[in-house]
Amino acid sequence: MITSEQEIIKDHLRLPLWLVVAAVFISVFAVYFPALNAGLVFDDLAMIPGNGDHLGHWSKLPDFFVTGVWNHSNIAYADGSLYRPLWLVWELLMYQVAGEAPFGWHLSNLLLHGLNGCLLYLLLGRAGNHHELWRLGLVLLFLLHPVASQNVAWISASTDLLLVLWLALAMLGYHGFYRHGSLSGLLLSLLCYLLAMLTKEAAIAFPVFLLVLEWQRPVQRRFPWVAAVAFALLTLGYLLLRQIILQGMLSGGQSLWLWQWSSLLRMLDYAATYARVLLWPWDLPLTRDHPPQGVGTALDYGLGLLLWLAALLSLIRVPRTRPYLALIIAALGIPLLLAFHGKGAFAVRYLYLPLFALCLLLGQLRPKTPGGKPAALLFSCVLLLLACVTHFRELPGWRTQADFARVLLKYHPSADNWNTLVQARIDAGDMAGAIEDYDKARDALQKRSQEPAVLAGSLEAIAFALAQQQDYDQSLKYYRELAGLPGFAYLGWTGAANCLWALQRLPEASDAYLSALQDKPEHLDALYNLFMLSQSLNRPQQAQWAAQAILRQNPAQVPEDISAAVRRYLQRANAGR
């Protein structure tokens, strides 16, 4: 973080701070402006729309600190893995400012990204790099690299943007304590570190950075035990609080430190994935699974081994890079540990903090003599190429839920992702596209010998949407297809009966309801509809049978108005005998 005065290279060129700030935000908005018109995707749909009960009232603020993240979504359930109360506070604040319209949320992500770029510029200067253009070049590398695109374009990835913001401020505060013994700098660093931990778990990598930083300076100048105890107590207190609130470090009660020898392969594969997406960010997967047995090729393992050896050599031979290298390794270590027992996977958004630390590391490797115009031109071309990849290739995948589903399918062609794409098409009112994607999904899964039942959700959604559009003939076709799937016959026959009733094919509708009840005798929708239809068909015995079957249901599961109507009918029927 700090170099000796002899290593500081004075340059004739000095850039005014306002010019750097302007360059940062102009670059961010020039490249990422398509994100401002993007919608809500994936986790955004669980956290923002229809979530006024959790994010619409400041009275909910204390609850954020005693429960997990997903307890406060619109699909609220007991969360045993994510404790991020400060991020929830940010979500509440943004909900008050922007409501449920995505523009304000996306704008805040762009502003946070630009602010992190400005803090990176300041940190590079504090670290002894006074070559202004090189510092600005590294800031642009951080801002424009496609790895950052997911964090900026995806609203729910603001956790990483806020995490880097707090840790950058913690570094700046610690710099004052490191160089001048400033108590206010230490307090600022402690406060921002606490805020970072309450934003995302990866913040606990910061003490590793401090330990390596202090280890390499003279013994007589190392930080006092008070500072060490303060950071240790904050970290332990956070882990204990997290343990109490979530009832365990991980849902499922598995040990965080579970180890297998095959995990060594995963470490190599993980490092290779990290290097590949940084050096060749043409195809960035949202996630990449790393099962215990490893999924990499021999080339992946060889590349991973070389990277680990290079990191070890750098730790030994290049003292200036040690703190930043330690931060990179520690920041990646948390999701890597979770991946060791199936609780997590590599995700590009995890690389936002390591990318920030990598730019700080590169600031320490600046040659003492400028590379001249050819080097500057080459670096500018690289930045322009990265900006184009980010703008034209990565950002389009985050415009809509359908675009996002296509990104998922590109790397994980699972039934769940096909269902997501079909539902997104339906929600957008594109029924023709939904049907086309369903046909593609069915053909793709058949080639992989998967049962068609895994697409039952898409099939039912298409049939229901067609019925709402009063295209009952087409809806009937898909409901009948659904009725042929094991485990979904009662849903298919009930939907088909509803369509037949709407088409005034009443006897056929009655038969379809009876078919649904053969598959699931207690299906209330089929029973009540059959009860009503039988009256229209003047079939009193069938109506009475359906009414009695409804009354045999658990009273708590039958709406009161239905129970009352059925009882009145039976009373009239008995009175008429």
Image (cartoon, rainbow, N blue to C red):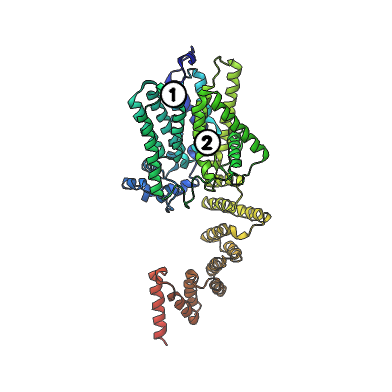
Residue extending furthest bottom? 577
Q: Amino acid at mark 2?
A: Leu
- In this view, the residue in front, 4 or 164, is 4
Name the N-terminal-most of marks 2 and 1: 1
What kind of element bears circle 2?
Answer: helix
Q: Amino acid at mark 1?
A: Leu
Which residue: 42% across, 47% down?
69
Q: Please give the label number shown on residue 244.
A: none
Q: Tell me residue 218's x, y (percent).
A: 44, 21
Q: Please give the label number shown on residue 351.
A: 2
Which residue: 48% across, 53% down?
252
Q: Quadrant of the C terminus?
A: bottom left
Q: Tell me residue 142's x, y (percent).
A: 51, 29
- In this view, the residue in front, 89 or 501, is 89
Q: Residues within 10 Å of mark 1 (few under 14, many from 20)?
A: some
Which residue: 56% across, 67% down?
496
Q: Please give the label number shown on residue 122.
A: 1
When asked about the image quadrant of residue 476, the answer is bottom right
Query: Gap in Å between the C-alphas at discs 2 and 1?
Result: 21 Å
Residue 188 visible within the image? no
Q: Tell me residue 489's x, y (percent).
A: 57, 67
Residue extending furthest front? 219
Which residue: 43% across, 47% down?
47
* Residues at discs 2 and 1 in contact (Cβ within 8 Å): no
- In this view, the residue in front, 565 or 174, is 174
Decide: is 188 above or below 289: above
